[in-house]
Amino acid sequence: ARWVVLLASGGHFAGAVFQVGASKAAKGRQGGGGEQGVQVLAHRTFHRYVIRAKAGGRQSTKDGAGGKKIKSAGSSLRRHNEAALERDIKEQMRAWAGHLQEARLVFVHALGVNGNPIFAGDDAPLHRSDPRLRKIPFLTRRPTFSEAQRVASTLAQIKYEDPPAPPTQAGVLDASVPPTPTRAAVDSVAALTLKEKKITAPSMLSESDIQAAREKAEKNAAKKARDKARKQEKKRLETEAAAAQQAAQELVRSEAAVIEVAQACTQSTGSSVLERLRAAKEDKLRAQAEKQAQGARCAREERAAAAERRLAALKGNNAAGDSAGPRCDNCGQSLVGHTPFHRLQYMYCTTACVRGHMQTLSEA
């Protein structure tokens, strides 16, 4: 019979065609078995990088889950490899069309999207309703040619087991009557008891062995009593230590409370002193600011008076020289024969006089 084994998982694909013949070896029925001869007719494996590193899963599964589409170089490579892997598998299935038609059984292990190249599409090489399809009834490893051989060899094995013989009437035991221990059972228990002493138990225990066992039991009982007393003493000491620690913590908390009260009293007493110092500093700063403002006011008044005096002098000069023609409103020079500079209602002989007169008026 011709078998086809197809394995697909995680970007790996392994396919093989086997010819299964007669049994090569036959053993006895009791615990025996036989393995049919398995001959490889054709095989092919593929591998493509389609699994997302660290995150796991195929790129197509991630794209189908929704959300933002990934546009990295790795995702593009995985999408290309998935399409290439599906194309390679379908081409190989078309090349094995003769083997698939002659196959008696087709064993497939391809879960989820791994089975799309085999079963999906109009040009699918196989259909899920094919009666020859079989699932592999045990765990498989990574799809490789050696794994396909192991699967075929395991499926071709035949094991025989005889059913257990039913109990006879003589062999049925009455549950109400306790069984009587046999001599062999007694000897085995004695051997286990004396195993530490490396003494081979005879058919019956001697008085010395019984005495040694009794002494050992007494020693074990005394040791257990000492251990129990030691544990009780340790527990008592731990309890006393915990109580002492708790008392020390309460004392520390009470002392901290006293310190906090003292600090609060000190702060309340010293707050008035700090307020007086702060008020005195503010008064000093206020007096300095008033003195500076008064000095600035006096300086402004002096500059304004000087400007008024200059303007009065200029007006006097202009009034005296009106008969001789127009004069510069800043320096008083005659503008006869010159093209004056005009600004508002004033006339100037030069731009320097314009700037000087503007500054004089602004100071006034």
Image: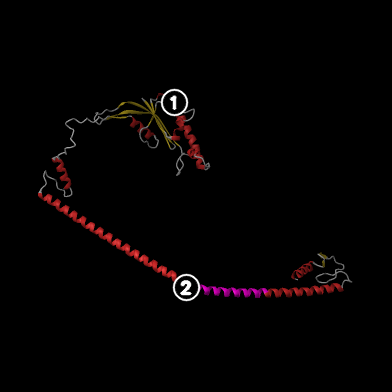
Q: Which residue is mark 2?
A: 266
In the displayed structure, 71 sits above or below 20; it is below
Lateral position of residue 211 relative to residue 257, left or right: left
The one of 251 and 158 positioned closer to us in this rendering: 251
Q: Nearer the viewer, mark 2 or mark 1?
A: 2
Image mark count? 2
In the displayed structure, 65 sits above or below 170; it is below
Lateral position of residue 163 relative to residue 4, left or right: left
- Determine crowd level at label 2: few under 14, some 14-19, many 20+ residues with C-alpha closer than 10 A: few
Identify the secondary structure beneath mark 1. helix
Which colouring convention does the figure follow? secondary structure
In the displayed structure, 164 sits above or below 223; it is above
Image point 28% across, 62% down: which residue? 237
**Is 287 within the magenta?**
yes
Q: Tell me the kind of residue under disc 2.
A: Thr
Image point 61% across, 74% down: which residue? 285
Q: Which mark is residue 97?
A: 1
Q: Tell me the kind of residue under disc 1.
A: Ala
Identify the image quadrant of the N terminus.
Answer: top left
Q: Which mark is residue 304?
A: none
Task: Check whether the beta carbons of the residues at disc 2 and disc 1 lie within 8 A of each other.
Answer: no
**Coordinates of residue 280 in the picture (x, y in percent):** 57, 75
The quarter of the picture where residue 146 lies is: top left
The residues tagged by marks 2 and 1 sit, at their Cα atoms, a distance apart of 101 Å
The quarter of the picture where residue 162 lies is: top left
**Coordinates of residue 192 in the picture (x, y in percent):** 17, 46
The one of 215 and 241 positioned closer to us in this rendering: 241
Q: Which residues are magenta?
A: 270-293
- Determine crowd level at label 1: few under 14, some 14-19, many 20+ residues with C-alpha closer than 10 A: some
Identify the secondary structure beneath mark 2. helix
